[in-house]
Image: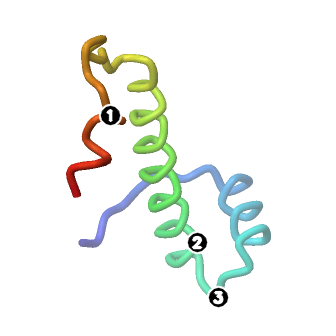
Amino acid sequence: MDATVAINETLLERAFQVGGLQTEDETVNLALEEFIKRRAIEEVIALFNTVEYDEDYDYKKLRGKR
């Protein structure tokens, strides 16, 4: 998909240098991939401490049933 997007040239140049990729297209695509991964990780981290455990659950009891 081709799109016309206004990109901050300073940020693009810095990303291009840091990423060490061959083209600006590769740089933008990598930046988008990393952005998506980071947001996905943040969603998982937000789930920490949200699981409620059954206090009566005995995981040791299930170990012997294999």
> Which residue does the numbered mark 1 point to in the structure image?
59
Disc 2 crowd rating (10 Å Cα; few below 14, some 14-19, many 20+) is many
Q: Position of residue 23 (x, y in %)?
A: 59, 83
> Which residue does the numbered mark 2 point to in the structure image?
27
32 sits to left or right of 62: right
Number of dots carrying numbers: 3
Q: CA distance from mark 1 to mark 3?
A: 52 Å
Q: Label 2 sits on what residue type?
A: Thr
Contact (Cβ within 8 Å) of mark 1 with mark 3: no
* Secondary structure under the numbered disc 1 in the rendered image: helix
* Secondary structure under the numbered disc 3 in the rendered image: loop
> Which of pointers 1 and 3 lies earlier in the amino acid sequence?
3
Q: Label 1 sits on what residue type?
A: Tyr
Question: Where does the N terminus fall, quadrant-wise?
Answer: bottom left
Instruction: Please tell me which residue lies in front, 33 or 45.
Output: 45
The outermost residue toward the bottom is: 22
Contact (Cβ within 8 Å) of mark 2 with mark 3: no
Q: Position of residue 12 (x, y in %)?
A: 66, 60
The outermost residue toward the top is: 55
State whether residue 22 is above or below residue 8: below
Instruction: Please tell me which residue lies in front, 36 or 18.
Output: 36
Disc 3 crowd rating (10 Å Cα; few below 14, some 14-19, many 20+) is few
> Which residue does the numbered mark 3 point to in the structure image?
22
State whether residue 7 is above or below residue 50: below
Q: Residue at x 64, y 88 (%)?
A: 22
Q: Position of residue 64 (x, y in %)?
A: 29, 48
Q: Position of residue 56 (x, y in %)?
A: 25, 14
Instruction: Please tell me which residue lies in front, 38 or 61.
Output: 61
Q: Residue at x 62, y 50 (%)?
A: 8
Q: Label 3 sits on what residue type?
A: Gln
State whether residue 54 is above or below residue 30: above
- The part of the image, by quadrant, that contains residue 2 is bottom left
